[in-house]
Image (tube, rainbow, N blue to C red):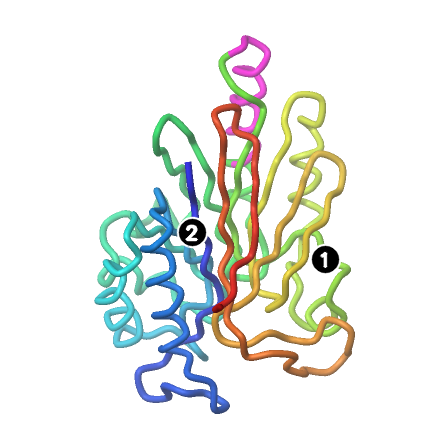
Amino acid sequence: MRCIQITDIHLDPEEREPQGVPAWDQFIWALDTCRGMNPDLVFITGDLALNEGSAPIYHALASLLDRAGGEVVLLPGNHDRRDLFHEAFGRRYRLDENRSTLDAVIETRGRRMLLLDSADAVIHDHSLAWLDALLESFASARKQGAHSGSVIVWTHHPPLGGFHRFMDRYYPLRNGEAFLDVCRRYRDTLHVTLFCGHYHTEHSGSRDNVTQHCTPSTWAQLDPETEDLRPSSTVPAIRVVDLDEMDRVTTTVIEPA
């Protein structure tokens, strides 16, 4: 099974080349590259909007998604407005009095993957409780031989910080340890592989039973070694994630040739 992650595209219909970077062209490169790699799923993990989400941004984006060549799944980031997703992207993203965030289970080819909404720079208590209940059910199934023990999670913010001085200081996930605490309860039975963005850099790391892969932006990358906001590159990138029949993960980051 092949998934492709696109993140931090930062689009605006009026400002098509923010800071001189052709953000729309680079996003279209990402979609066309996806199509050439025959994905089962394409995850766009937040910060669809340049500054703040709006209906024109999301409708313009929605008109391009068929280019990806696979089913596209969206998550909001801190620059987005999840309340506007439904009209542009369909009923999967409907909010109501019983649903205030876009956490979801995605089922494809017999696999269940989790979407965790961190757009408010926190994972809300109800989302953590939802995650806990799912992991408990997966752990129980693993003990009965009905689950591989591999859990795939897609989100915007990295719960495991410590690799980007500017973003860690000013724009971290405020309760990353709470997410890790939930995962640690199942360390004897489950391994969580998490894919995120937000930090505009590539990084992979592990703690306890969580492996985290942070994916670069399609717009611009940020220098992780400085305490100020300093671009390091305007080369776009996407992440390819392959799962074998045992749910083992192989992943690599792709840039334009």
In the picture, the disc for residue 101 is 2
Q: Give the farthest residue toward the top.
A: 144
Mark 1 lies on residue: 161
Q: Nearer the viewer, residue 39 or 88?
A: 39
> For residue 112, which quarter of the picture?
top left
Image quadrant for the N terminus? top left
Q: Nearer the viewer, residue 71 or 166?
A: 71
> Sequence-wise, which precedes: disc 2 or disc 1?
2
Residue 120 in the image, given as x and y percentages of width and height: 53, 61
> Is 89 drawn above or below residue 234 in the view shown?
above
Residue 143 in the image, given as x and y percentages of width and height: 59, 11
237 vs 33, left or right, is right
Residue at horizontal 29 percent and vertical 69 percent from the top: 61
20 vs 74, left or right, is right
Residue at horizontal 52 percent and vertical 52 percent from the top: 155
In the picture, the disc for residue 141 is none
The kind of residue on which mark 1 rests is: Gly
State the extent of the magenta-drawn residues as a range.
131-145
> Is 231 drawn above or below residue 176 in the view shown?
below
Residue at horizontal 36 percent and vertical 77 percent from the top: 24
The kind of residue on which mark 2 rests is: Thr
